[in-house]
Amino acid sequence: MPQHSETWRLITAPLPPEIAQAENGARVLWRRDDASTVTVQYPRRPEPAWLLTGTVDFPQVVDMGVMADGLAAGQVWGFEVLANTVRRPSRKARAEEGLPIEYRVSAREWLTDESVETGTEGTPLVSRAYSSGFSLLHLADEQSVARKGPPSLAGLTRIRGVLKVEHPESVRAALEEGLGRGRSKGAGMLDLRYVVRRPAAVTSPPARRR
């Protein structure tokens, strides 16, 4: 299995430029599930020529639009995301608190803590979960996934849990655009799935202003 940069090149090589090079809105997302399996999410139904060399004759294709169109406030979903849980504090915070340029945080902190990365000057600081339109109900044990690469991508974290939809359009954007950094390197693709039982809620702090 090629490394993440080579995998990204193989995925995007057959795509039209407006899809392969998209940086805003719906975009191509992918993740490595195991040594022989790569899952790719396209912004529209893929053409046969787009599929990776070596793909099985009849790959499973799921229409994300059907699920996205059906999102509604109050729905409860199980979720999974392979995330680059790195935080990059502001220059001011680095100077005042002696923080490094970037550092890895826990999955819970990455999702629920308020961050300067999700706000702008004069606007409320909110959590990544809040800005993505959901509240966190349950977080399963973290599973680190070792991967070669530079320090900020040396390992991704597979995050599983249960969420509640608060703002459907924001959740749809998170599905289409991914979460966090490293999306071209196999991070950030959000999966939703049905849950059988509702776990106890996890409370998050309210937004505050800088």
Image (tube, grey):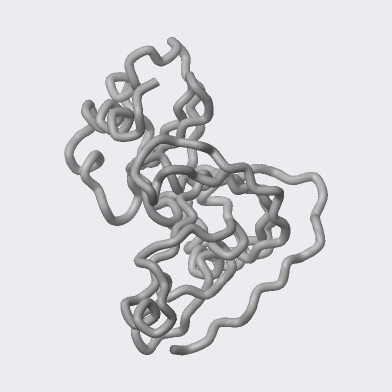
Q: In the figure, residue 89 lies in which quadrant?
A: bottom left
Q: Is residue 7 above or below residue 81?
A: above
Residue drawn at the location 47% of the way across and 31% of the way down = 32
Q: Count up the numbered dots.
A: 0
**Outermost residue toward the front?**
98
Q: In the figure, residue 148 lies in which quadrant?
A: top left
Of residue 40 and residue 165, the one placed in the foreground of this image is 40
Residue drawn at the location 47% of the way across and 89% of the way down = 209
Q: Is residue 91 above or below residue 122?
A: above
From the top left corner, tell me how far across and down residue 103 is, in percent. Answer: 44, 61
In the figure, is residue 73 to the left or right of 180? right
In the figure, is residue 175 to the left or right of 177? right
Residue drawn at the location 39% of the way across and 80% of the way down = 93
From the top left corner, tell me how far across and down residue 66 is, in percent. Answer: 52, 43
Residue drawn at the location 56% of the way across and 62% of the way down = 111
In the figure, is residue 199 to the left or right of 162? right
From the top left corner, tell me how far across and down residue 87 is, in percent. Answer: 44, 64
Specify the quadrant that holds the C terminus: bottom left
Of residue 99 and residue 175, the one placed in the foreground of this image is 99
Q: In the figure, residue 119 lies in which quadrant?
A: bottom left
Specify the quadrant that holds the N terminus: top left
Q: Is residue 21 above or below residue 12?
A: below
Of residue 110 and residue 30, the one placed in the foreground of this image is 110
